Amino acid sequence: NAGVTQTPKFQVLKTGQSMTLQCAQDMNHEYMSWYRQDPGMGLRLIHYSVGAGITDQGEVPNGYNVSRSTTEDFPLRLLSAAPSQTSVYFCASSYSSGTTSTDTQYFGPGTRLTVL
Amino acid sequence: AQKVTQAQTEISVVEKEDVTLDCVYETRDTTYYLFWYKQPPSGELVFLIRRNSFDEQNEISGRYSWNFQKSTSSFNFTITASQVVDSAVYFCALSERNTGNQFYFGTGTSLTVIP
């Protein structure tokens, strides 16, 4: 099992550019999520999904879009990048029960994004 | 209000010393889960432990031990005989059954073990 994979590992964007951060898992986990990590602030939830076709907002969703067309993939889109989105982004997945997941989340290696 | 508080931002210890990382949480849920993750300098997040609110038994895994006390809403992590490889940022996290769609992370404690 590859676990949770993320691409790219590093990315530099100019303000206003768009891009998609890719996330995939091969553990058949229903629950997937995106976090951003900023110095001194821990990890903050951006969006999450409890299954294919279902997504919802987390703590800091503004400026980001997600979709979940398959169980395996959960891409994160930045439509118009801003310097405030410079961060490290982590994707995670876990088992879920219905619409909740309190199970252990397993994280991808992260994507370091810089917006100039 | 912060649901998970890690008051220690940075800790430095000399190799072989014991060190305890504090975690205090806040929840009204009766069923919840607590986690610790390690983030070494390479950046990945490594799962260490998961505890549920009904199991207050302390846990030991090698040099790692965890002390869960519901009376003080704390879930502290102790590393015995610290090693340089323990240098990392450690995160405590909370997941509640009633709002189980989100993990609440603390801000992390950066541990440096000096050889």
Image (cartoon, coloured by chain):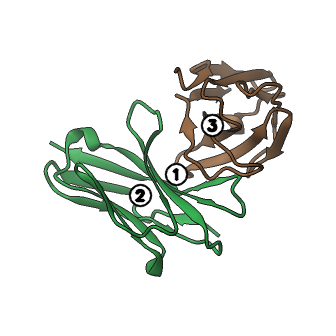
The chain ID associated with circle 2 is B
Look at the numbered disc 3 and give the secondary structure of its residue.
strand
Residue B1 at what x, y percent from top left? 65, 70
Q: Colour of chain A?
A: brown
Task: Please tell me whether residue B113 is drawn above or below residue A16 in the rendered image.
Answer: below
Look at the numbered disc 1 and give the secondary structure of its residue.
loop
Residue B102 at what x, y percent from top left? 68, 53
Residue B110 at what x, y percent from top left? 38, 50
Q: Residue at x 31, y 56 (%)?
A: B11
| Residue that badge 1 annotates | A40
- Nearer the camera: disc 3 or disc 2: 3
The chain ID associated with circle 1 is A
- Rounded to the nearest angstrom, the CA distance separating label 2 from label 1 is 8 Å
Residue B9, labelled with which disc? Answer: 2
Would you say the residues marked 2 and 1 are in contact, meaning their CB atoms lie under 8 Å apart?
A: yes
Residue A93, labelled with which disc? Answer: 3
Q: Residue at x 41, y 58 (%)?
A: B9
User: Amino acid under label 2?
Assistant: Thr
The chain ID associated with circle 3 is A
Q: Colour of chain B?
A: green
Look at the numbered disc 2 and give the secondary structure of its residue.
loop
Q: Residue at x 70, y 49 (%)?
A: A97
